[in-house]
């Protein structure tokens, strides 16, 4: 099969190298999370904007970004800590993500909360939070609750590369976090492709990580066997499986781990959003420009489209890329 | 299904939408109408071969879908007017608007 035709044009902030000079897990996590935030705010067409933040000393839903350096990212299991709310109105008018640096035991954990349509803060019917509490939204959806936002690193953090991409209409933002030659974590905040018409608001979001730093996260086992893409409809939330074409007992990309014998091209398959959540069952749409690939390929395998690396393998999925070599560790 | 590539006889699967290692139409959540639209699912079909020499995605099929396996032979779907699609042996096929006789 020839490489897929892209639905969208993508802007990349690629190969952001994050290296912990201090060689501690906390320093590493501060640098990586800070880089993600900086990238989202730096997209050329529709950059994300800050609706409010806490650096553990001061806070406010006042559009002030208090994460001025990575040192401003303070994790805690309770009490004073850092958080930030970022907005992307191209997904829905008041689509916001709150990154709350609240953990159980380690700074690789965080709370990630999405407001798909209302927005956080008193101005939107929620609360503004404080240096000890994140702000709330009336439609909030907690997609990570002191869960791993990045793979486990106990010591000697490796070079980590943050790969950020946004469609030039601002409707899709994706971040891949890479180390040890693996794509160990990713997030996605998207408008879906071909959604059912009644769906409101039409947006999907995910932030998931491998538990260890040597395993890919976007795999059939993690994203097809488990429902890890979140959504809401009319106030009720659900989760999607990233469904794919399959036969016998597995997806086609799991069972056919060679290039197509006819044309020597690798197969790709559409990612279909399928919900098994009660009252939300069925097919709801697809993802733009993200495909299931073959288990027979590893990370950074590039697909030659017009030039070099127009598509690249991330785990067992295939994403558009910018023509450079994707750094994964 | 069988097909021929050059001088090689081969076979292929009629693949369909999968999650958790099973076809959607065979799983509980895929055997009911969409909870929001109220419409029964028509699961698309692609042709995949695993036979050496013809491995990979071969193509698709026209106007044939997998349906939920809980449906009964002869169940019909009203598209524009009546009975434009019918369910037979896990497949949904075009029909001619009449009541399909299965016995």
Image (cartoon, rainbow, N blue to C red):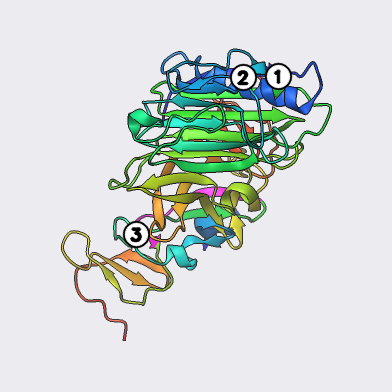
Pointer 1 or 2: first along the chain: 1
Q: In this view, does A276 lie above or below A307?
A: below
Query: Label 1: which residue?
Result: A18
Q: Do the residues labelled 2 and 3 touch (CB within 8 Å)?
A: no
Q: Contact, CB < 8 Å: mark 1 with mark 2? A: yes
| Residue in the picture at 61% in, 19% down | A35
Do discs 1 and 3 share a chain? no
Residue A166 rendering spot, x and y as whole percentages: 48, 24
Query: The residue tagged with tag 3: helix, strand or loop?
Result: loop
Label 2: how many Cα within 10 Å (few below 14, some 14–19, many 20+)? many
Q: Which of the chains bears the disc numbered 3?
A: B
Q: Residue A49 colored magenta? A: no
* Disc number lying in front (2 or 3): 2
Q: Where in the figure is residue B101, as x and y percent of width and height?
A: 27, 81
**Viewer-proximal residue among A279 and A235:** A235
Q: How crowded is mark 1: few (under 14 residues within 10 Å), some or many (20 or more)?
A: many
Q: What residue sits right under mark 3 in the picture? A: B35
Q: Position of residue A307 (x, y in %)?
A: 57, 19
Q: What is the chain letter for disc 1?
A: A
Q: Tell me what residue is drawn at x 67 percent, y 53 percent.
A: B52
Q: Position of residue A213 (x, y in %)?
A: 75, 36
Report, in whole angstroms, how far the alpha carbon at label 1 lies from the one at label 2.
8 Å
Check whether the beta carbons of the residues at disc 1 and disc 3 lie within 8 A of each other: no
- Segment colored magenta: B53-65
Res A324 visible: no
Q: Name the subunit of mark 2.
A: A
Q: Mark 2 points at which residue?
A: A35
For the point 55% across and 47% down, the residue is A228
Evaluate whether residue A317 shows in this view: yes
Query: Residue B73 lies in what quarter of the image?
Result: bottom left
Q: Does the magenta stretch include residue B57?
A: yes
Give the side of residue B39 with respect to residue A167, left or right: left
């Amino acid at each position: 099969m020839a490489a897929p035709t892209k639905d969208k044009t993508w802007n990349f902030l690629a190969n952001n190298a994050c290296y912990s000079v201090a060689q501690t897990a906390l320093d590493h996590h501060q640098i990586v999370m800070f880089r993600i935030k900086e990238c989202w705010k730096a997209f050329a067409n529709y950059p994300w904007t800050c609706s409010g933040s806490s650096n553990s000393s001061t806070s406010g839903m006042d559009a002030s970004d208090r994460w001025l350096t990575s040192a401003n990212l303070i994790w805690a299991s309770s009490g004073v800590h850092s958080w930030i709310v970022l907005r992307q109105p191209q997904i829905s008018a008041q689509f916001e993500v709150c990154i709350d640096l609240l953990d159980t035991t380690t700074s690789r954990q965080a709370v990630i909360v999405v407001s798909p349509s209302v927005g956080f803060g008193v101005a939107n019917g929620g609360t503004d939070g404080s240096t000890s509490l994140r702000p709330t939204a009336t439609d909030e959806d907690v997609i990570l609750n002191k869960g791993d936002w990045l793979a486990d690193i106990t010591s000697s953090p490796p070079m980590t590369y943050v790969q950020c991409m946004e469609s030039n209409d601002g409707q899709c933002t994706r971040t891949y976090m890479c180390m040890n030659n693996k794509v160990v974590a990713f997030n996605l905040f998207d408008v879906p492709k071909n959604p059912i018409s009644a769906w409101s608001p039409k947006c999907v979001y995910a932030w998931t990580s491998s538990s260890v730093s040597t395993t890919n996260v976007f795999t059939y086992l993690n994203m097809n066997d488990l429902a890890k893409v979140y959504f809401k409809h009319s106030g009720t939330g659900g989760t999607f499986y990233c469904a794919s074409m399959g036969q016998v007992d597995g997806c086609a990309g799991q069972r056919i781990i060679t290039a197509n014998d006819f044309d020597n091209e690798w197969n790709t398959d559409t990612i279909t959003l399928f919900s098994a959540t009660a009252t939300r069952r069925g097919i709801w749409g697809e993802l733009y420009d993200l495909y299931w690939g073959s288990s027979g390929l590893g990370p950074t395998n590039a697909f030659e489209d017009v030039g070099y690396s127009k598509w690249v393998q991330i785990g067992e999925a295939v994403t558009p890329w910018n023509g450079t070599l994707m750094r994964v560790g | 299904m069988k097909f021929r590539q050059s001088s090689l006889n081969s076979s292929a699967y009629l693949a369909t939408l999968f999650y958790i290692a099973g076809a959607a139409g065979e799983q509980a959540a895929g055997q009911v109408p969409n909870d929001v639209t109220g419409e029964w699912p028509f699961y698309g079909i692609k042709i995949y071969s695993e036979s050496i020499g013809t491995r990979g995605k071969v193509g698709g099929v026209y106007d044939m879908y997998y349906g939920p396996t809980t449906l009964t032979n002869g169940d019909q779907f009203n598209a524009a007017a009546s009975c434009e699609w019918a369910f037979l042996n896990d497949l949904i096929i075009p029909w001619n608007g009449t009541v399909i006789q299965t016995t």
